[in-house]
Amino acid sequence: MMLSVLSKRFRECGLELNPDKTKIVYCKDEMRKGNYSNTSFDFLGYTFKPRSCMNKNKNKMFLGFTPGVSKSAINSMRAKTKNCNWRNCSSISLNDLAEQYNPMLRGWINYYGRFNRSAMYPVLRHFNNNLAAWAMKKYKHLYGRKKKTTQFFERIIKVQPNLFAHWKIGMIGAFA
């Protein structure tokens, strides 16, 4: 019913709704507690859905309808990291990797991490895992040694915590 009204109004302006992509979404949150089938939608790389939020003034959790990076955007970012294939390039230095990939990492963090930064963890963990794979191929003493590789990066992070954009904001976990 509602879609037909919207479709008519849009046609008057020369616009058309795509029925496969258009749906009415119930923005469930703390104040709207009803149960409906559609409670989320994707737009511009974000998924808008009910999420737990913190009211810092009252130090209390509540349910809000907020954006976070979408699964398709996460998959796209992980694929981009994988397709660069630098993990197999042992001739490049860690500083060169940082210089080359920090603009991309900063862009992702600034855009997708704007509203729900923790939703970026899977992408940044994937990047760290690629760094670990790169180090195990570059340095013979690390080959096949995940624990030593993790310790190797822990030492680097202590000395150069700002080397990579995501390290700078504290996303340093999952190295092996």
Image (tube, rainbow, N blue to C red):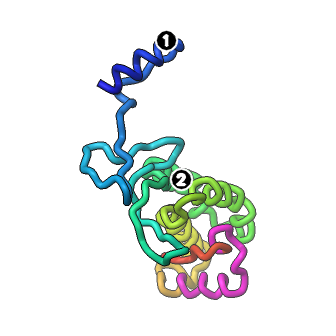
State the image coordinates of residue 130 (x, y, percent, origin top left): 54, 66
Secondary structure, mark 2, is helix
Left or right side of 156 for 124: left
State the image coordinates of residue 78 (x, y, percent, origin top left): 50, 55
Magenta-colored segment: predominant secondary structure: helix
Left or right side of 39 for 11: right
Left or right side of 63 for 99: right
Q: Which residue is mark 1?
A: 12
- Residue positioned 40% across, 19% down in the render: 7
The image quadrant where one finds the N terminus is top left
Tag 1 near tag 2, CB within 8 Å: no
- Mark drawn on residue 77: 2
Q: How many marks?
A: 2
Amino acid, disc 2: Met
In the rendered image, is residue 90 in sight?
Answer: yes
Q: Mark 1 against mark 2, which lies toward the viewer?
A: 1
Above or below, 21 relative to 44: above
In the rendered image, is residue 175 in sight?
Answer: no
125 magenta-colored: no
Q: Which residues are magenta?
A: 149-167
- Mark drawn on residue 89: none
Along the line of sight, the residue nearer the viewer: 41 or 34: 34
Secondary structure, mark 1, is helix
Q: Quadrant of residue 161?
A: bottom right
Mark 1, residues whose alpha carbon is within 10 Å: few (<14), some, or many (≥20)?
Answer: few
Mark 2, residues whose alpha carbon is within 10 Å: few (<14), some, or many (≥20)?
Answer: many
Along the line of sight, the residue nearer the viewer: 173 or 55: 55
- Residue positioned 72% across, 81% down in the render: 160
Separation (CA) of disc 1 from disc 2: 39 Å
